[in-house]
Amino acid sequence: MGNFQLEDFVAGWIGGAASVIVGHPLDTVKVFGFFKGMAFPLTSIAVYNSVVFGVFSNTQRFLSHHRCQEPEAGSPRVLSDLLLASMVAGVVSVGLGAPVDLIKIRLQMQTQPFREANLGLKPRVAALGEQPAYQGPVHCIITIVRTEGLAGLYRGASAMLLRDVPGYCLYFIPYLFLSDWITPEAHTGPSPCAVWLAGGMAGAISWGTATPMDVVKSRLQADGVYINKYKGVLDCISQSYQKEGLKVFFRGITVNAVRGFPMSAAMFLGYELSLQAIRGDHVATSP
């Protein structure tokens, strides 16, 4: 159990693909389009979730193995192990997720008009009929690197770190405890229905609570296309609060929570069922 296991990454990739297919329409509503640019998130977020789930599962096993040299299959989970594994997954997620989110937002913000209040920026392309700044994901990456340097790909990364480290703690831990709570004691593992329900609830909890920092992250990542408004996380928080009040940090919380349920339900169900198929098990296994 203490050994590195590759199947968690494979299962995470499949679960990530399932979550994008289910959640992309609501995700683009949150950021401005509808079914715009699905090919990019389908490939990139699948890889992203593969790494996140693989890192979390293997870190948890590593910690459990070194705490109890030969942990039993049915041994109870330790909260400190889950917290640390979730935090490690959150840190790693930023390394991959920050450029993915940046490119997704930059592409989506130019596909159709959106209210100035959303990010504090006017849709200059839509308003003036100009050519879009980016022709696609690859051109977007090249343009950002050329104009802003490699560091430009990680614009908003600090806000994302503040969002994802606690966010993944409120993602994996509620899922594991809820799935255990829903599953009858006589069963050796959660049923697909339990996985779906626990995964959906965990996603709603995680995304709902992550909304304030997600607003800051999105504003920082959208900044810089036409003008530079923010100097950093604190400046973005300060300017947003002064101009729009406290309510601005909870804008989109309903969409986030609603979107989080089906996306996370599909994510965990895809993960568990594919992991079950890879290992030849007949019951779902928790990450």
Image (spheres, rainbow, N blue to C red):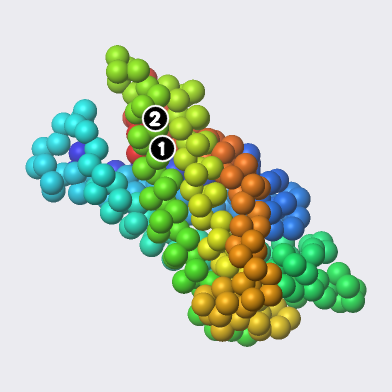
- In the picture of the structure, the residue carrying the numbered disc 2 is 179
Asked whether residue 145 is in view, the answer is no
- Residue furthest to the left in view is 69
Give me the residue at 38% from left, 62% from top: 91
Q: Residues within 10 Å of mark 1 (few under 14, many from 20)?
A: many
Q: Which mark is residue 175?
A: 1
Mark 1 belongs to which amino acid?
Tyr
Q: Quadrant of residue 285?
A: top left
Q: Percent position (x, y) of residue 111?
A: 79, 62
Q: Residues within 10 Å of mark 2 (few under 14, many from 20)?
A: many
Give me the residue at 74% from left, 74% from top: 121
Q: Percent position (x, y) of residue 184?
A: 35, 18
Mark 2 belongs to which amino acid?
Ser
Vertical comparison of 77 with 47: above or below? above
User: In this view of the protein, which residue sits in the foreground, 245 or 83?
Assistant: 245
The Cα atoms of the two marked residues, 2 and 1, are separated by: 6 Å
Asked whether residue 191 is in view, the answer is yes
Q: Quadrant of residue 143?
A: bottom right
Dot 1 falls on a residue whose secondary structure is helix
Give me the residue at 35% from left, 52% from top: 86
Q: Is residue 242 left or right of residue 268?
A: right
User: In this view of the protein, which residue sits in the foreground, 126 or 253?
Assistant: 253
Q: Quadrant of residue 191?
A: top left
The number of numbered discs placed on residues in the rendered structure image is 2
Q: Percent position (x, y) of residue 249?
A: 60, 62
Tell me whether the residue at label 2 lies in contact with that at label 1, contact meaning CB atoms closer than 8 angstroms.
Answer: yes
Q: Is residue 88 left or right of residue 204?
A: left
Q: Is residue 178 left or right of residue 98?
A: left
Q: Percent position (x, y) of residue 42?
A: 60, 49
Q: Quadrant of the N terminus?
A: top left
Give me the residue at 50% from left, 44% from top: 205
Vertical comparison of 39 with 201: above or below? below
